[in-house]
Image (spheres, rainbow, N blue to C red):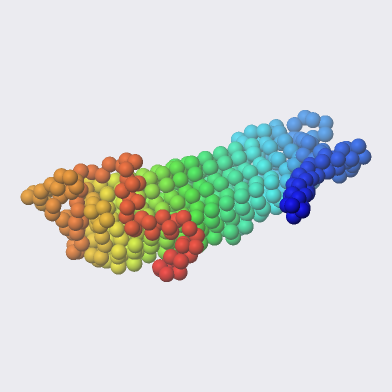
Amino acid sequence: MENMLLRKVWVCAIFFLFISISVIPKVGSSLLMEKLVSDDNVILDMYLSSGDKTLYVGGDGLDNYSSIQDAIDNVSDGDTIFVYDNSSPYYENVIINISINLIGENKDTTIIDGGGSGDVVSIYSDHVNISGFMITHAKHDLIHAGIKILSDQNNLSDNQISYNEAAGIIMSNSSYNKIQNNIMKNNAYYNIYLDDSSDYNTFIQNSFITESWSYSSDGLWLIHSSHNIIQGNSMPNLRCFIGIGLNQDSDNNQVGENIISSDGTGSIGLQISDSDFNNVFDNEITRYEDQGISLVFSTGNSIHGNTISLVDGGGISLCAGAYNVIQQNMLFSNEIGIRLSVNSYHNQISSCNIKDNDCGILMEDYSPHDNIIYHNNFVRNDENAYDLYSSNTWYNSDLKQGNYWDDYKVKYPNAKRIWLKGIWDTPYEIPVGDDKDMYPLISQWVESSSITTLRDKSTDNVLFRLINRFPLFQKLVLSVYRC
């Protein structure tokens, strides 16, 4: 009985101790705040007042600054500087080394002009917000820009960054920034350039405009930069080599819903080079000379839902790529819809509409092997497919389903339908080599919610899902299969 009573006492003691611990911080914090307020504590006063001040540049105010840099040199963290346009242009090279809001009156008329000397605006502090400016005339070389960002968690929105003889924006070792609703116009070399582990940045709804061959700059270029989001940007009629480039270990980026087109002279719409596990989805890419989407020495990327047209070379081209998924894309009016070469292997091409191309899919004679191609519709191509290497699978062996070929009945007039399975009884021979589609579809593959259920039954897709979901599995695949 004594032991039981003792245990009850201990339980009660522990319970009240737990309640006391949970309450003390709240009470203590409240008492501490009351003491700070009653003592008119200097630290608290500084904290409360920080960020409340607005300074003005230009305009007619009595205390307004005439220089943006002078105003920056007289603010505290979190303060705002508002710049009027009636004193524009401001011929300055602005250096920001404090967390501020820098607001221009109008992005078309509030101009910061670097005069061809250095960077126009340099950001060295975190948490800087800039909007409402035209930023122009950086120094003409490869290392300067209209805006150079060397810090984190900044926000650039509703600016016009134009006529910089160097780059529009350069970000170096700069992460968690948001670049939104800006006009990138007539910049040389690059409109936006990231390097040195500039990760977790967001680029949304920016417009890229080129009006002259003097400003034939690439759109958005990444080197050694991962986990960025590039979505909803417009790049119409660019005069450039590459619209968007993911290069040299730029992994796990999201590139979606962008409009990427050239005036017919650009080389590549979207390039992935030596970069892995990127997600490229729902982009419109048109009018390039070489490739719409190019993958070179890249593994585990997902290319899905894109519409690619009027490309003189390959709509989607793989060179030495492995374990990439090319799915649900529309490829029409290209010289070649999809092109694989140079030891590209274990890639999946499925559920694509491949129409009105000179050649639908081309497996070149440079060892593309062990790729799986199924549930694609081949319609009105001059030649639906060529497989010069003859070591690929043109059907899904688990589902026992292949592709739809619009010339099937012409080639096999005596073939019979296997009604319950939706396939023909005679394999479709892929021209040039010895590969065959063992289960050619009677009707075009129609995208529906059931596709996921069917796809999940494939052992190949289990592997693709593991690759794209688990980082450790990604590393394992790279260590074994990286070309």
> Residue 479, how many percent across, how many down?
45, 69
- 146 vs 430, left or right, is right
Residue positioned most to the left: 414
Is residue 98 shown to the viewer in this render? no
> Residue 420, how many percent across, how many down?
17, 45
Quadrant of image for the C terminus: bottom left
173 shown above or below 284:
below
From the viewer's side, name the closer residue of 233 and 21. Answer: 21
Is residue 3 shown to the viewer in this render? yes
Quadrant housing residue 236:
top left
> Residue 261, how many percent across, how many down?
41, 45
Residue at screen point 48% across, 65% down: 475
- 253 vs 426, left or right, is right
> Residue 453, how many percent across, how many down?
33, 47
Residue at screen point 27% across, 56% down: 398
From the viewer's side, name the closer residue of 386 and 210. Answer: 386
209 shown above or below 341:
above
Residue at screen point 20% across, 43% down: 443
Residue at screen point 30% across, 61% down: 371
Quadrant housing residue 110:
top right
- 42 vs 77, left or right, is right
